[in-house]
Image (cartoon, helix red, strand yellow):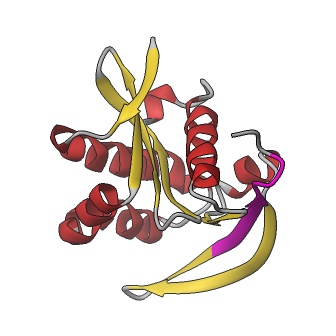
Amino acid sequence: MYLIRDVKETDLSSLELIYHDAVMEQGRRGYSDAQVSLWASFPYLYPTDFRTLIQTGYTRVMACNQIPVAFATLYPDNHLALLYVLAGHTGRGLAGRLCDDIEQESGRRGVDCLRTDASLLSRPVFEQRGYRLIEEEQVEKAGQQFTRFVMEKSLSSLSI
């Protein structure tokens, strides 16, 4: 059984693993090996940045038998910053449930429009949830070029 809960300090190493695993397992569907390797290494190359984002933002964890298998972070209040699901738990609606939670929290915080920076892989997921494309960007990180999509969703129709 999957349950959504607040992040705990003891979850941080699990969230690093979920992030890394999700990128390594799914990233090759749209990115080169070098891009995937760099992307997946973010929690380890920049541990302070990763942990600060998790701890400063509104982070929700999806747990199975109390073990984290997915997570999402809202930071700042109008930006869905992170959404990752452990590879063995994809296709079960976990990302959608986490998005619902994040969108509702953002709305409670008075946000009218929620933004995210989607990857090639997550863009279709966000489009299905009613996000619209604002801009396509080319971002350079450590010598690697990444395509990402700035997307937004109006929250005015959500009942909070």
Q: Nearer the viewer, residue 147 or 53?
A: 53
7 lies left or right of 105:
left
Left or right of residue 160: residue 64: left
- Range of residues picked out in magenta: 148-157
The structure residue drawn at horizontal position 31% and vertical position 40%, both measured from the top left corner, is 7
Looking at the rendering, in which quadrant would you find the C terminus?
top right
Q: Quadrant of residue 14?
A: top left
Q: Nearer the viewer, residue 33 or 128?
A: 128
Left or right side of 7 for 133: right
User: How many numbered tags mark residues here?
Assistant: 0
Q: Nearer the viewer, residue 156 or 51?
A: 156
* Residue beneath the point at 35% across and 43% down: 18
Residue at 63% in and 48% down: 103
**151 part of magenta stretch:** yes
Residue positioned 80% across, 69% down in the render: 133
| Viewer-side residue, 17 vs 11 | 11
Q: Is residue 129 above or below residue 63?
A: below
x then y, percent, for residue 16: 27, 50
